[in-house]
Image (spheres, rainbow, N blue to C red):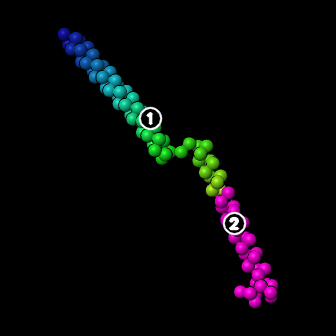
Amino acid sequence: MHLRLDADAQRSEAEKWRKGKTKAEEDLNSLKTYYKKLRLSMRTAGLVSKPQHRNRVEGKLEQVRRNERKDRRVRSVTTELRDSDPVFRGKR
């Protein structure tokens, strides 16, 4: 009789673990589905960019920075030439 109670208790415990595992798997699947829907809606809204788009944008930003540096150098050289030439100094 005592052994039968232990077996029933173990069976009951195993059933609880199985139900808990099933519930955890369902929750995980639900979270995965939610995450996929969230990513899709963010992509649709334009909040997430693809790596190729990001690389293209970063390339354009680098190009703009290079042009700005070049413009600054040209302006500084122009200013130096203007300051060193007596003809231009009088026209200011």
Task: Say which mark, if any, is on residue 36.
Answer: 1
Determine whether 56 is above or below 79 in the image: above
Name the residue furthest front.
Answer: 91
Is residue 38 visible in the rendered image? The answer is yes
Helix, strand or loop under label 1: helix
Instruction: Tell me which residue sits at (69%, 61%) in the image.
Output: 66
Is label 2 in contact with label 1 (beta carbons under 8 Å)? Answer: no
Q: Which residues are magenta?
A: 63-92
Mark 2 — residue? 69
Instruction: Tell me which residue sits at (65%, 59%) in the image.
Output: 64
Residue 33, percent from left and from top: 40, 32
* Quadrant that contains the N terminus: top left
Report the front residue among 92 and 10. 92
Relative side of 25 to 77, left or right: left
Instruction: Tell me which residue sits at (39%, 29%) in the image.
Output: 29
Determine whether 18 is above or below 66 in the image: above
Q: Predominant secondary structure in magenta? A: helix
Q: Quadrant of residue 19?
A: top left
Q: Quadrant of residue 11?
A: top left
Helix, strand or loop under label 2: helix
Determine whether 37 is above or below 66 in the image: above
Task: Say which mark, if any, is on residue 61.
Answer: none
Instruction: Tell me which residue sits at (48%, 47%) in the image.
Output: 47
- Name the amino acid, label 1: Lys
Report the front residue among 30 and 20. 30
Is residue 28 visible in the rendered image? The answer is no
Q: How many marks?
A: 2
